Image (cartoon, rainbow, N blue to C red):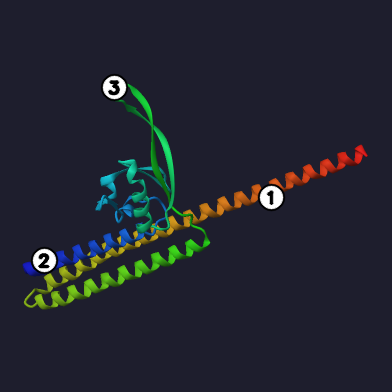
Amino acid sequence: MKRAILREFDDLGEKLSSLNGIFAYRLRNLCVKAEEMSLLPIEVLIEGEPQKLEQCTTIGKEDDYSFMIIPKYDEDMEALGHAITIAHPEFKQEIKSMKVDAVDQAGNSKDVDVRYILVTMPEVDNDRYDVLKDGVKVANEECKAQMEAANTSADVRFAELAFGETDEDLEKLKTGRDKLNEQWNGQREKIYNEKLQEIEDAHNKWLAEREEKEQKRQEDEASHGDTAAHSMKLDELAN
């Protein structure tokens, strides 16, 4: 088989792989859980110079749904908060502090208060649930169309280069192309379905928490009602 055909085949594989990577990146920026990749677009303007988030902060996770973003210099706190808002206005931000062990100039241990921004992903309520699912569906359809376009382009080149190839080699090319598409279409579907499940889990979490709050409210109202009724009976007995 011609070298040019094999090169075109490899190029198709790289293109399909790249499109899957872009698709995964897009879905991680439709944030449900605290995904490190969602922080990549954030640039902080410090003393007139843009810096990547990892250059000017230390990042940790409090849980699956929140980041602890600690500026290397406390004076950058305002710029940091602004940069997060620009990239992800949906993120909830709260300035908090924690005590950390440090050593003074004399070598003595001491506790130091360190401020940080607690960044929490928004809840997946009914409205956001619909928005996220629609966004994932659109991204999936766009990736699927781009993969089909990549195959169409490759097929044109294969047809141009295939003159003089044996039937056996042409069959190998077709089989290889089919397997390549099976692999990357399967990967795209996996990314798509995992994101949908993530959205479902977060929405169910929100529903359960809402139900728990409503149940507690009803119990509190019932308790207050019982207390009020008991007080009225005591007042009647006293009279």
For the residues labelled 3 and 2, the Cα–Cα distance comes to 62 Å
Percent x, y for residue 131? 45, 65
Q: Mark 1 near mark 3, Cβ–Cβ under 8 Å?
A: no
Q: Label 2 belongs to which residue?
A: 7
What residue type is disc 1 on? Gln
Indicate the position of residue 75 as horizontal and vertical percent values: 33, 43
The dot on residue 89 is none
Do the residues bearing badges 2 and 1 touch, measured as CB atoms within 8 Å? no
Tell me residue 134's x, y (percent). Answer: 43, 67
Percent of width and height locating residue 156: 16, 77
**Residue 96 is drawn in which quadrant?**
top left
Residue 234 figure quarter: top right
Query: Marks 2 and 1, Cα distance to the nearest angstrom?
Result: 68 Å
Quarter of the N terminus within the rendering: bottom left
Q: Residues within 10 Å of mark 2 (few under 14, many from 20)?
A: few
The foreground one among 159 and 94 is 94
| Amino acid carrying mark 3 in the image | Gly
Looking at the rendered structure, which numbered label has been put on residue 107?
Answer: 3
